[in-house]
């Protein structure tokens, strides 16, 4: 089982992320949970979220990068769902040993994420916040899935990324 | 003018952050805006927030570190307030040249933020997300103000940190 926690603030206006989500439709054992569709008022049902994670062997956090990290509702999800005694701390073993895949789209291309680029750092400089969140809960961090320069991609290229995403999730589900 | 954007999810239950906020009470030219008091339902008045920043020469983001970065409501504040055409992009000059101070408390002590510590990285590994947000808007990044191991500090030590915080802000306001 793979649980995809999908966080796009405007799912209807998304192009790249929607293509990725559509590309994994029908994959056996994959559940997609669109946070902004479920919780437009930020009132997360943390119990339901935790339940959806329990059966998963892989947790995917999929979203556009916004201000170098996760959108606000996914940050709130971290705070409400990944609680002491469940995800970490004494008795907090629920996620231990699961795999975590960070699947993101960026507005900027790979060159923008470099010392000479507009963001001044390689993308890996922004990974520790999310990676350590997963690792603090005992999850195994996978190589992130990144779609660079998502806003500049034509539909054909987006579909190619979609295929790559579907193949990545399929291989994880087979493991 | 210094605008302190204060983000503690439970301001009434805060000990360390409340001490810091109390310690800067009455400082000339300092405005404190408590986001979770103002916007408990996450409905940020972005116009009002932008107005409060315009007069400031220094912007302070004060909060407890939660999952290695800002609390969700401050992340939402980044997304809603720091918009294209105002904070960045063509015509987005509103914050250019202002200083930005990141003022945080951590649950873990400094040793926890090291390769051998529970967080596996030095604290500086988690700085780029917030720092680049400020810098992308043209703000000058100051050395962060950090209170380590805030939950373990007794009232006397917290008051000492409060004095240090007040002195830091006073020196910025004099500049």
Image (cartoon, coloured by chain):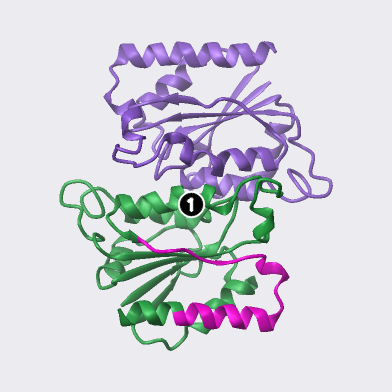
Chain colours: A purple, B green
Residue visible at 34% across and 32% down in the picture: A13
How crowded is the residue under tag 1: few (<14 C-alpha within 10 Å), some, or many (20+)? some
B166 inside magenta stretch: yes
Q: Where is residue A33? Give x, y as percent.
A: 56, 31
- Camera-side residue: B18 or B163? B163
Using the rendered image of the protein, determine whether residue A109 is visible from the camera's viewpoint.
no
Chain letter for mark 1, please.
B
Q: Is residue B45 above or below residue A147?
A: below
Residue B11: say if magenta.
Answer: no
The residue drawn where x is 62% and y is 43% is A133
Left or right of B63? Residue B82 is left
Name the image quarter holding residue B147: bottom right
- Left or right: B106 as drawn, with respect to B125: right
Q: Position of residue A48 (x, y in %)?
A: 67, 39
Q: Quadrant of the C terminus of chain A?
A: top right
Displayed quadrant of residue A10: top left
Which residue is drawn at the image coordinates 59% and 38% (left, top)? A131
User: Mark 1: which secondary structure?
Assistant: loop
Does residue B69 sit above or below A111 in this rendering? below
- The magenta region covers B141-167
């Amino acid at each position: 089982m793979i649980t995809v926690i999908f966080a796009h603030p405007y799912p209807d206006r998304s192009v790249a992320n929607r293509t990725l989500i559509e590309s994994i439709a029908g994959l056996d054992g994959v559940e997609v949970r669109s946070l902004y569709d479920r919780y437009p008022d930020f009132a997360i049902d943390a119990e339901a979220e935790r339940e959806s994670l329990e059966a998963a062997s892989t947790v995917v956090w999929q979203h556009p990068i916004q201000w170098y990290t996760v959108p606000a509702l996914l940050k709130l999800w971290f705070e409400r769902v990944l609680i002491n005694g469940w995800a970490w701390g004494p008795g907090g073993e629920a996620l231990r040993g699961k795999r975590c895949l960070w699947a993101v789209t960026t507005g900027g291309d790979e060159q923008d994420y470099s010392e000479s680029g507009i963001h001044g750092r390689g993308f890996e400089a922004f990974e520790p916040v999310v990676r350590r969140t997963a690792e603090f809960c005992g999850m195994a961090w996978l190589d992130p899935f990144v779609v660079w320069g998502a806003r500049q991609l034509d539909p054909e290229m987006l579909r190619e990324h979609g295929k790559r995403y579907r193949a990545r999730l399929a291989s994880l589900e087979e493991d």
